[in-house]
Image: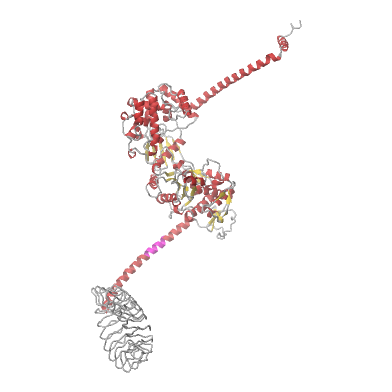
């Protein structure tokens, strides 16, 4: 009965306890697990669906509106240069719209087969087609169509950016459905074919037909249509007008033909016949294609706008784009790379550079390759997208600037350039495989030493160097290591230029940019560029600049120096690994990359040179490593007009030729050339100005001096001409000592013939009345001459100290004497006398021969008295004059008529051939060239000695006889005989 009072729950509990636990709980637990799992999955699915839908709606809430104006009549964008002048209208001249009715069926089928074979079946998005595209791609059939429908492509081309993000994809799907609801399939296809980018800056199928083939759409052949239909996937890669693309363009066209056959648009025979056609057949020459000015710079502009304004479409939004382009600089850049201004080794050799404003960061011009690489657009732009190791151009950025900034080093801080190894144990080598021991930081940077650079970076700390470099715009694809200190990091010319500009801008960095601002059709604008940011102290910037000056003036960068500019810069090269050297069989000295980065207060420029591919013949030889410097020099020489110099800030103190930071202790240095002084020097600009003023003043003084000198010379010339005229009239002295036959006597310093009055020129004189007093030889005169020269037969004998003929009584003049009785005691020459004279003078024919030290006549045996000797056999060797002897004498004295002529350096008679002994010469044919006097000869002698009567006159600088025309003599000396002896051998 008590059970009747139990509650229902109590009875249930009693019953439950009576049941075996093992029979009921296990099955119930298993069922509960699966039920909970299913419920959980369902709930998660619902939550995920709700979240997905919510996310989708969040993504599409700010999707752009479908504006009919854009779809029907897209607007081109205008691009302006730095001065606001229109440079290019992007897309305008490249677009010719057509209606659906104007589109041939062949064209429609080609694009449908390639891009969207289910176009007429889906509602904007083809999920089945997308799944099929994924499966086909997994099988490796990459030539088939992609996952986006033509409707989706219209949305992308007209309204969305090219970003590949989930948000943009969600908006693309949403807008594709909306577009299908608002427009017909034919209208959408028309929009697509009028907008699609088909390369060569051709937008739309009709424009492409004209640009590539010069045809209307209706006139295109099957192979031509197939080529155009293959372009949308990669216009730059499949453009057949570029020689390097011909093979890829052919393969792509054949894929389109295969797809058209697969979808039943053409037969197999039509496909095969079309495949046989050369893809280049019918193409317009490249020169006839419409071109874009400055394509590399335009490419950089478009890419910058697309990056900064991802929702804008340059081809259709009607933007006004104001760029930093300097047309003059860009034209020069193109000329330097492509018009033989520089001697490049071959056509494969490439160059790329960025030329920018040091203060503002505005890029003025770029070089993006040579030859076929120069016209890049929507392709690889080397100036902004190159990734090559920078070499030593990284040293100022990664090593030495951080050392000054963080460690407060002075430019003369000592670094030990001694053997060193990386932490891995690998040896570090300098370029010259040598070591310099302790050197200054300036010297280490100037000579680009590797070991000091790595030691500096390690002392700063690799992480700190990385942090400093990133503030200068340098990016790192991998974590920096010790080797980064010598430039193993890959960079572009634009990155390096931006970093170096900060050194020239007092430590302020401005990111390099190509666009100033963009203005939308509604008047709203978007400014580009950044405000300068102080990334280092002005002291660090200036000290780096001053050291980089040394690189250009006396270091590794001298080929980049421009004398009129204040240039700072750094070279950089990279080498091949030992494995690459062996693989390509290239010399160990081969260079892979060669850089130069430099700047002035006005412009900054970073240049890279090298080859795009490594190969046996594609390396930089040692003589071509300086081409990067030459490119820099060409640009700066033409464009840099600001001749100002970098100004040293007050935070820097100069010590001799070195610098240190003000307020910091003097850096310990064994360099005794650095004086211990803290005096502030004059500013570089002031020094430059004063020096320029000084140079200008000196230049003016020099010009005035030249003018005065010129006037003086003209006056002297006039005076000299006047003096000549007067001297000719006055018949003044001559100085050449040789025979002359003019009346009145010549005043040329040469010899003189028979003249009245006698000449006073110090030269020889013929028979004159009265006798000459010129100190030269004298003929037979009455009275005898007193001129100290030789004398003929005179009565009474001459007392002139010169030679004397046969006189009675004998002369006492101390000169030579003829045959006299008794013999003369005058100390001069003596004729034939018995007994022989002992007067120390010349002696005639005597037996025995005289021993008086004077001249000797014909004696047997010959005299050995050191005097003159007559005709003797054998000839005398006494050093005196010699008569006619065979063989001729070699005694250094005068010589008579001998055959062959004597070579003894003495006077010579009439001989054939003439003597070349440097002595006087008689009448000979041909005339002598021995530098001595010459008789009457034809032609006249050119021996520099005196000359007799000749026609034409001699040009030998010596005396001249009667000549027709008269001789042109050398300018006279002072006419004082004896002061300037003649040098004519006569």
Outermost residue, bottom direction?
Answer: 822
Please report the residue visible at 44 percent of the width from the left and 25 percent of the height from the top.
176
Quadrant that contains the N terminus: top right
Q: Quadrant of residue 950?
A: bottom left
Residue 281 position within the rendered picture, expressed as x and y whole percent measured from the top left: 33, 35
Q: Nearer the viewer, residue 48 or 704?
A: 48
Quadrant that contains the C terminus: bottom left
**Is residue 559 at least partly visible in the picture?**
yes
Residue 843 position within the rendered picture, expressed as x and y whole percent measured from the top left: 34, 89
Would you say residue 702 sits in the magenta stretch?
yes
Q: Look at the picture and state if 258 lies above or below 894.
A: above
Q: Look at the picture and state if 509 lies above or below 24.
A: below
Outermost residue, left direction?
Answer: 964
Report the span colored magenta.
696-704
Count numbered badges in the picture: 0
Q: Nearer the viewer, residue 697 or 435?
A: 435
Q: Look at the picture and state if 69 lies above or below 914.
A: above
Coloured how? secondary structure
Residue 262 position within the rendered picture, expressed as x and y whole percent measured from the top left: 40, 25
Horizontal side, residue 16 vs residue 171: left or right: right
Would you say residue 588 sits in the magenta stretch?
no
Q: Nearer the viewer, residue 105 or 706?
A: 105
Outermost residue, top direction?
Answer: 1
Horizontal side, residue 491 vs residue 348: left or right: right
Main secondary structure along the magenta-highlighted residues: helix
**Is residue 648 at least partly visible in the picture?**
no
Residue 921 position within the rendered picture, expressed as x and y whole percent measured from the top left: 30, 78
């Amino acid at each position: 009965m008590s059970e009747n009072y139990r509650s229902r729950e109590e009875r249930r509990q009693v019953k439950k306890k009576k049941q075996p636990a093992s029979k009921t709980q296990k099955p119930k637990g298993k069922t509960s697990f699966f039920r909970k799992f299913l419920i959980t999955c369902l709930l998660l699915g619902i939550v995920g669906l709700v979240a997905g839908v919510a996310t989708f709606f969040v993504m599409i809430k700010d999707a752009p509106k479908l504006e009919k104006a854009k779809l029907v009549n897209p607007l081109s964008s205008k691009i302006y240069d730095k001065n606001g002048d229109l440079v290019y209208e992007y897309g305008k001249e490249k677009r010719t719209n057509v209606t659906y009715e104007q589109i041939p069926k062949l064209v429609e089928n080609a694009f449908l087969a390639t891009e969207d074979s289910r176009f007429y079946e889906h509602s904007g998005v083809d999920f089945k087609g997308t799944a099929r595209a994924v499966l086909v791609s997994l099988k490796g059939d990459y030539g088939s169509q992609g996952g986006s429908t033509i409707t989706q492509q219209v949305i992308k081309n007209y309204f969305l950016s090219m970003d590949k993000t989930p948000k943009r994809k969600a908006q693309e799907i949403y807008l594709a459905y909306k577009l299908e609801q608002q427009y017909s399939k034919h209208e959408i296809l028309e929009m697509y074919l009028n907008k699609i980018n088909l390369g060569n800056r051709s937008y739309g199928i009709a424009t492409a037909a004209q640009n590539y083939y010069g045809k209307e759409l209706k006139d295109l052949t099957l192979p031509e249509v197939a080529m155009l239909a293959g372009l949308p996937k990669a216009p730059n890669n499949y453009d057949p007008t570029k020689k390097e693309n011909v093979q890829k363009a052919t393969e792509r066209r054949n894929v389109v033909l295969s797809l058209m056959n697969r979808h039943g648009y053409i037969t197999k025979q039509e496909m095969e016949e079309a495949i046989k056609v050369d893809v280049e057949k019918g193409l317009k020459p490249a020169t006839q294609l419409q071109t874009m000015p400055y394509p590399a710079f335009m490419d950089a502009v478009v890419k910058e706008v697309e990056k900064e304004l991802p929702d804008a479409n340059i081809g259709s939004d009607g933007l006004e784009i104001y760029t930093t382009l300097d047309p003059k600089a860009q034209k020069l850049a193109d000329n330097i790379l492509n018009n033989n201004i520089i001697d490049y080794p071959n056509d494969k050799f490439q160059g790329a550079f960025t030329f920018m404003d040091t203060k503002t960061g505005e890029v003025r011009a770029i070089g993006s390759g040579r030859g076929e690489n120069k016209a890049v657009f929507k392709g690889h732009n080397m100036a902004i997208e190159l990734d090559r190791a920078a070499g030593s151009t990284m040293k100022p950025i990664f090593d030495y600037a951080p050392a000054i900034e963080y460690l407060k080093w002075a430019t003369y801080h000592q670094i030990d350039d001694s053997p060193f190894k990386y932490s891995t144990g690998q040896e570090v080598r300098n370029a010259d495989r040598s070591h310099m021991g302790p050197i200054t930081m300036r010297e280490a940077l100037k000579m680009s030493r590797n070991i000091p650079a790595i030691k500096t970076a390690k002392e700063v700390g690799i992480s700190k160097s990385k942090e400093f470099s990133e503030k200068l715009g340098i990016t790192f694809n991998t974590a920096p290591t010790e080797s980064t200190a010598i430039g193993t990091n890959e960079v572009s010319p634009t990155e390096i230029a931006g970093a170096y500009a900060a050194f020239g801008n007092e430590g302020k960095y401005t990111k390099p940019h190509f666009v100033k601002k963009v203005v939308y059709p509604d008047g709203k604008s978007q400014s580009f560029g950044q405000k300068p940011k102080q990334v280092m102290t002005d002291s660090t910037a200036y000290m780096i600049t001053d050291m980089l000056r040394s690189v250009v003036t006396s270091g590794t960068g001298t080929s980049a120096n421009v004398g009129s500019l204040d240039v700072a810069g750094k070279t950089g090269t990279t080498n091949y690994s030992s494995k690459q050297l062996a693989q390509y069989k290239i010399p160990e000295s081969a260079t892979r990359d060669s850089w130069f980065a430099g700047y002035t207060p006005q412009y900054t420029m970073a240049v890279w040179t090298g080859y795009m591919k490594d190969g046996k013949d594609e390396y930089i030889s040692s003589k071509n490593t300086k081409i990067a410097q030459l490119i820099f020099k060409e640009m700066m020489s033409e464009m840099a007009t600001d001749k100002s110099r970098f100004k040293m800030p007050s935070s820097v103190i100069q010590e001799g030729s070195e610098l240190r930071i003000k307020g910091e202790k003097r850096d310990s240095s064994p360099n005794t050339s650095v004086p211990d002084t803290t005096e502030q020097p004059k500013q570089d600009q002031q020094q430059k100005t004063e020096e320029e003023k000084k140079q200008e003043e000196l230049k003016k003084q020099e010009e005035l001096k030249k003018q005065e000198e010129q006037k003086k010379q003209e006056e002297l010339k006039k005076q000299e001409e006047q003096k000549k005229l007067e001297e000719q009239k006055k018949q003044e002295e001559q100085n050449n000592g040789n025979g002359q036959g003019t009346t009145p006597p010549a005043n040329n310093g040469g010899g003189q013939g028979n003249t009245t009055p006698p000449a006073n020129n110090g030269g020889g004189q013929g028979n004159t009345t009265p006798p000459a007093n010129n100190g030269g030889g004298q003929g037979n005169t009455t009275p005898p001459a007193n001129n100290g020269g030789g004398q003929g037969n005179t009565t009474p004998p001459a007392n002139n100290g010169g030679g004397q003929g046969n006189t009675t009584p004998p002369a006492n003049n101390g000169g030579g004497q003829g045959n006299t009785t008794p013999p003369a005691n005058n100390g001069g020459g003596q004729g034939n006398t018995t007994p022989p004279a002992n007067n120390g003078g010349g002696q005639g024919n005597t037996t025995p021969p005289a021993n008086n030290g004077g001249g000797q006549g014909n004696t047997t045996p010959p005299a050995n008295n050191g005097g003159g000797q007559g005709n003797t056999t054998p000839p005398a060797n006494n050093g005196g004059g010699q008569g006619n002897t065979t063989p001729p004498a070699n005694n250094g004295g005068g010589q008579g008529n001998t055959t062959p002529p004597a070579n003894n350096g003495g006077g010579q008679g009439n001989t054939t051939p003439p003597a070349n002994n440097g002595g006087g010469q008689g009448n000979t044919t041909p005339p002598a060239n021995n530098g001595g006097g010459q008789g009457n000869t034809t032609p006249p002698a050119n021996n520099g000695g005196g000359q007799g009567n000749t026609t034409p006159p001699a040009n030998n600088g010596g005396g001249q006889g009667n000549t027709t025309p008269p001789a042109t003599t050398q300018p006279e000396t002072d006419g004082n005989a004896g002061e300037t002896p003649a040098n004519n051998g006569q």
